[in-house]
Image (spheres, rainbow, N blue to C red):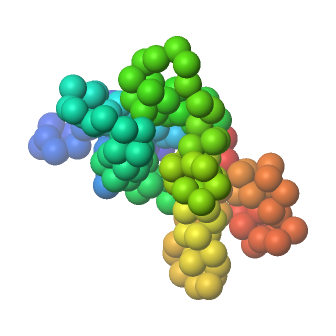
Amino acid sequence: RWKGKQDWPEGVKYLKVVTEMKIFGFTICPTYQQTLKRTWEKVTSGFEKVLFSWQSRQLETLAQRVEVARIFALSKLYYVAQVLPLPAKVTKKINSSLSKFIFRGRHERLRLDELENSCEDGGLGLPDIAVKADALLLKQMCRMMNHPDEKSFRLLGYWLGEFVRETGFEDSFPELADLGPVS
């Protein structure tokens, strides 16, 4: 009865029909896929702005550029990655921007997975973004699983029900898999 309602009473001026709204850094849209897309678009835009602001600075070594990327740019991703899964397309875009920043656009580059090795193994300790995002999301899921009677558990099931089924976690978390579906 409220869906699609456009004719609100005259005295109710504070109600406004919107297709999306920003809450705590997340762009909430009518569907899960739209929420995922719009939120990660804004986050990657902020990520790229941070890298751009550091491009003109004098950072002589790869280690310095990796450290700047880790501290100032990648940290922008971690807050959202705790709540929303990082799509593969976004991971690819982030890795591309990161590679251009670290290697200053040079054609001869190392693969990022070589930089992800520890210093002892010849790398620079750059985090693997996809693995880190999955770990952060899983950490929140486990935290919520410890309190299955709370509202956060139902919210988790609503937003991640389909994700749990697709990734094969439904055997481990049957309570969540049954709470979906998510469109």
Tell me which residue sits at (59%, 30%) in the image: 110
Residue 105 vs residue 19, the one in the foreground: 105
Measuring 63% from the left and 75% from the top, which residue is drawn there? 142
Q: Position of residue 1 (x, y in %)?
A: 48, 43
Point out residue 98 in the picture as x, y percentages from the top left corner: 46, 33
Report the residue at 52% width, 75% height from top.
151
Which residue of the protein is positioned furthest toward the top in this rendering? 107
- Tell me what residue is drawn at x 55 percent, y 25 percent: 109
Quarter of the rendering containing residue 78: bottom left
Q: Is residue 15 visible?
A: yes
Q: Position of residue 168 (x, y in %)?
A: 84, 57
Decide: is 167 above or below 105: below
Give the percent coordinates (x, y) of residue 36. Answer: 52, 40
Tell how many labels: 0
Report the front residue among 81 and 74: 74
- Image position of 73 (left or right of 111): left
The C terminus: image quadrant: top right
In the picture provided, is 172 more to the left or to the right than 153? right
- Tell me, yes or no, if residue 133 can be seen here: no
Pick whichever, 171 or 10, lies toward us. 171
Q: Is residue 112 left or right of residue 103?
A: right
